[in-house]
Amino acid sequence: MNDFKFKKKYGQNFLQNKDTIKRIATLGGVNDDSLIIEVGPGSGNLTVVLADLYNSSNILCYEIDNSLEDSLSVRLKNYTNVRVLFCDFLSSDIVSDVSSYSYNKLYFISNVPYYITTPILFKLINSGLPFEKIVMMVQKEVGDRFCSLPSNRDYNALTVILNYYFKIKKEFIVSRNQFYPRPNVDSVVVSFENKGEKENLKDKNFFIKLVHDSFKFKRKTLRNNLKNYDLDKIGQVLKKYGFDLNVRAEALDYKIFVEIANILM
């Protein structure tokens, strides 16, 4: 791919280090006869490792850059377990796409384009598909938010929502020097393991809205951010955990937000 023109609008920085690529693929721990989704295969460096390592499973890739079609076709021509769809993943009907496969378990393993990391995660969540595990390489500061704890400066609405759905683990740091072209930031590989049994939630959409509203102005208290909600009911829940309406959202564990959402419904 010496003549390839990298496109900044697609966040194209291709990981080159073979040991790191294999380490990412191995983190998936994929069972036999499963289906793996990859977004942004790019040069196919991760794709071929996944196809070799999990040769009894299928890999479904989404690539938005049509100019990569020829090079990926050559790179992947001997892999019968790989299919590449040249389209925008965020606009795709992934439920329909995976319905054509028979699989044991579903995984997502990808070095995602950093500019759409959060939309990708919400698309996976909103699809309702039962992902066994998600392994993503993301920008380091974004990974720090994903794995943050209450009262930490990186703790935000996305942290709360993701913690409801997954057990999140920061796996390892990837230096910017392992990419071509070299980005301006380091990266981190993060895994999201399906919790299976989750806390009962009456309305997931309402929960997500409540959390976003709670963090709308980060330095303001819940009393101010949630003034359009029933503050008496919110106060009842907070009191159980030793808080009051003057607390900021960043101090609260996700389970408290779940309980608040339920009492308001």
Image (tube, grey):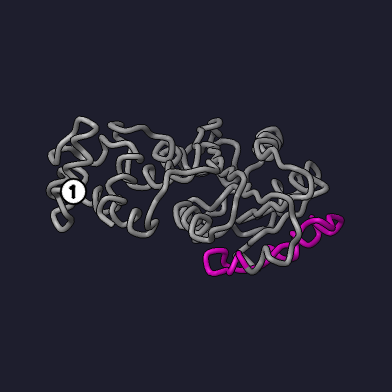
Quarter of the picture holding the C terminus: bottom left
Asked if the stretch drawn in magenta spans residue 129, the answer is no
Image height of 75 relative to 32, above or below? below
- The percent position of residue 148, horizontal first and vertical second, equals 38, 34
From this viewpoint, is residue 255 visible? yes
Give the residue at x 68% y 65%.
99
Residue that protrudes farthest toward the right in the picture:
78
- The percent position of residue 126, horizontal first and vertical second, equals 49, 59
Disc 1 packing (10 Å; few <14; some 14–19; many ≥20) = few
Q: Give the range drawn in magenta.
A: 67-95
- State the count of labels: 1
Image height of 18 relative to 181, above or below? above
Image height of 65 relative to 31, above or below? below
Asked if the stretch drawn in magenta spans residue 71, the answer is yes
Quarter of the picture holding the N terminus: bottom right
Residue 195 horizontal side relative to residue 240, left or right: right
Give the residue at x 60% y 37%.
178
Residue 243 horizontal side relative to residue 153, left or right: left
Q: Which amino acid does label 1 sit on?
A: Lys
- The percent position of residue 213, horizontal first and vertical second, equals 25, 54
Give the residue at x 67% y 58%.
61
Residues 88 and 127: in front is 127
Residues 222 and 145: in front is 222
From this viewpoint, is residue 67 visible? no
Element at label 1: helix
- Quadrant in the picture for residue 245: top left
Q: Mark 1 points at which residue?
A: 233
- The percent position of residue 239, horizontal first and vertical second, equals 18, 35
Give the residue at x 61% y 56%.
40
